[in-house]
Amino acid sequence: MVQIREFNKKEQNRATAEQSADLIKKARKDYDKLVKGMFEFVDAKGGWIEFHERTFKGQNPMTIRLVHGEICELPMGIVKRLNGSKRKIRRFNAEGLTGNVKTPQIYETVSRLKFTPTDVL
């Protein structure tokens, strides 16, 4: 038995080059807005974290090193990234401990990093 399937590529709504440039310019302006605040490393108080960042095409890669309790100025894009960093703590139901019953895990999310602006402090 012969089967013939025809696949059509879904059309994507793409912005023109001018619209794209305007959107990137606006996003970069929002990203680059400096915010002064205090960095807190919840997982390792007194420790430090170092990571690399390159968000926009043509931007040079940056290495950022932050120390717990440090007051500094960071771009808003990096602040959003830091405050969005979470880790999962896995737990099992008590029913899953008896026998061979597989139960779904329960996840609790805890913030790893915090950046609190000085406006809030």
Image (spheres, rainbow, N blue to C red):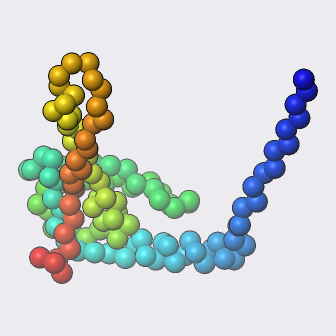
Left or right position of 5 against 95: right
Which percent across, then down, holds residue 97?
17, 25
Residue lying farthest to the top in this orientation: 100
- Which quarter of the figure is the N terminus placed in? top right
Residue lying farthest to the right in this orientation: 2
Q: In this rendering, is residue 109 above or below 75?
A: above
Left or right position of 118 against 76: left
Q: 34 and 120: which one is in front?
A: 120
Which percent across, then down, holds residue 21?
63, 74
Q: In this rendering, is residue 72 above or below 66?
A: below
Left or right position of 70 against 109: left
Q: How many marks?
A: 0
Q: 34 and 116: which one is in front?
A: 116
Which percent across, then down, holds residue 17?
71, 72
Q: Residue at x 69, y 77 (%)?
A: 18
Q: Residue at x 15, y 59 (%)?
A: 40
Q: Residue at x 69, y 71 (%)?
A: 15
Determine which quarter of the picture holds residue 83. bottom left
Q: Residue 49, can we see it? A: no
- Which quarter of the figure is the C terminus placed in? bottom left
Left or right position of 44 against 92: left
Q: Residue 7, can we see it? A: yes
Residue lying farthest to the left in this orientation: 46
Q: Residue at x 49, y 73 (%)?
A: 27
Which percent across, then down, holds residue 59?
50, 60
Residue lying farthest to the bottom in this orientation: 119
